Image (cartoon, rainbow, N blue to C red):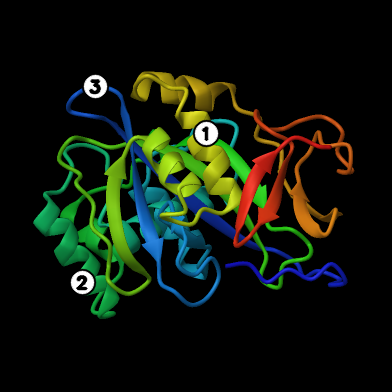
């Protein structure tokens, strides 16, 4: 899933964005939308949230007319492009799209996704034809994770929380994502501990935080209080194995915690499990 080398000098991380899509479950509680990445490549086979790297088209000035104003504090030009990237990737990987006004029907979202995938058009052009706009104001800044220096492929990823309308059901694309589902955060964490699925530390920590929310209002409240300073795990040895330590861990350069929970993820078998520093 990861390609870690303690002797790696490190490459400059690429900008990326992720959309953490939540909704109130029909029977009460919170659900989050997850997708499974294809088996090859970065985080291959892992359960993740829809997202991907920034594309040059995401910073096209024409987006100004097809977007609402992003939420503070991520309101600068660079963050605007990343919010666009989060929405675009959500459409491509999950058939979910934050729109101002009435949401598109599921069939319309699938049609838009297919047309973009065939390169017949672009999301920006489709929005212009329909007189619609991305609702960047609906994206709540949640976290910022930077891939460890020891990883061969590095990303500086902004995590946005998005509360989905009841009509947004979501669907994987059978290319970059091979499965998808809605589930309570606690259920996804249970399946991870049971070795039924794979999670990377940023996904696991996000689910841990969301598992404390009773509903979407609680999730938005957690996002409003979240620390948005970058979290860049550091690879260290842990006995005979390795661990990814987070800010606040005794072996991390940043001494103040930037995320609630245990301070490190220790590799146990093929999974990084959360643990306190020894």
Name the residue nearer the viewer: 195 or 108.
195
In the image, what residue occupies the spot 74% across and 36% down?
Answer: 263
Q: Is residue 264 left or right of residue 102?
A: right
The image shows residue 19 at horizontal and vertical percentages of: 43, 47
Contact (Cβ within 8 Å) of mark 3 with mark 2 = no
Q: Quadrant of residue 139?
A: top left
Name the residue nearer the viewer: 68 or 111.
111
Name the residue nearer the viewer: 40 or 172.
40
Q: Is residue 79 visible?
A: no
Q: CA distance from mark 3 to mark 1?
A: 18 Å
Mark 1 lies on residue: 208
Mark 3 lies on residue: 28
Q: CA distance from mark 3 to mark 2?
A: 33 Å
The image shows residue 108 at horizontal and vertical percentages of: 12, 58
Callout 1: helix, strand or loop?
A: helix
In the image, what residue occupies the spot 45% across and 48% down?
Answer: 194
In the image, what residue occupies the spot 75% across and 42% down?
Answer: 246
Callout 3: helix, strand or loop?
A: loop
Please tell me the numbered disc located at residue 12: none
The image shows residue 50 at horizontal and vertical percentages of: 40, 55
The image shows residue 31 at horizontal and vertical percentages of: 31, 35
Say which of marks 3 and 2 sits in front. 3
Few, some or many residues within 10 Å of mark 3 (<14, 14–19, 20+) = few
Which of the marked residues, 3 or 1, is nearer the chain's N terminus? 3
In the image, what residue occupies the spot 59% across and 47% down?
Answer: 202
Few, some or many residues within 10 Å of mark 1 (<14, 14–19, 20+) = some
Contact (Cβ within 8 Å) of mark 1 with mark 2 = no
Mark 2 lies on residue: 114
224 vs 120: above or below: above
Callout 2: helix, strand or loop?
A: helix
Q: CA distance from mark 1 to mark 2?
A: 34 Å
């Amino acid at each position: 899933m990861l390609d870690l080398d303690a002797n790696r000098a490190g490459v400059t991380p690429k900008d990326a964005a992720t959309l953490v899509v939540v909704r109130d479950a029909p029977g009460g509680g919170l659900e989050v939308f997850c997708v499974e990445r294809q088996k090859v490549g970065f985080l291959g086979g892992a359960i993740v949230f829809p997202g991907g790297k920034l594309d040059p088209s995401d910073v096209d000035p024409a987006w100004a007319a097809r977007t609402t104003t992003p939420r503070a504090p991520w309101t600068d030009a660079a963050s605007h492009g990343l919010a666009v990237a989060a929405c675009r990737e959500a459409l491509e990987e999950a058939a979910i799209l934050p729109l101002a006004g009435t949401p598109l029907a599921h069939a319309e979202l699938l049609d838009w996704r297919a047309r973009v995938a065939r390169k017949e058009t672009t999301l920006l052009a489709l929005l212009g034809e329909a007189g619609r706009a991305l609702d960047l104001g609906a994206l709540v800044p949640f976290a910022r994770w930077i891939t460890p220096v020891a990883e061969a492929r590095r990303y500086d990823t902004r995590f946005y929380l998005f509360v989905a309308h009841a009509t947004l059901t979501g669907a994987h694309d059978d290319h970059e994502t091979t499965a998808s589902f809605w589930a309570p955060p606690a259920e996804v964490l249970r399946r991870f501990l049971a070795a039924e699925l794979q999670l990377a530390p940023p996904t696991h920590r996000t689910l841990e935080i969301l598992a404390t929310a009773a509903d979407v209002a609680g999730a938005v409240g957690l996002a409003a209080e979240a620390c948005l300073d970058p979290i860049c795990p550091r690879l260290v040895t842990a006995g005979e194995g390795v661990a990814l330590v987070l800010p606040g861990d005794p072996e991390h350069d940043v001494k103040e915690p930037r995320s609630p929970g245990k301070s490190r993820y220790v590799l146990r078998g093929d999974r990084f499990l959360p643990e306190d520093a020894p």
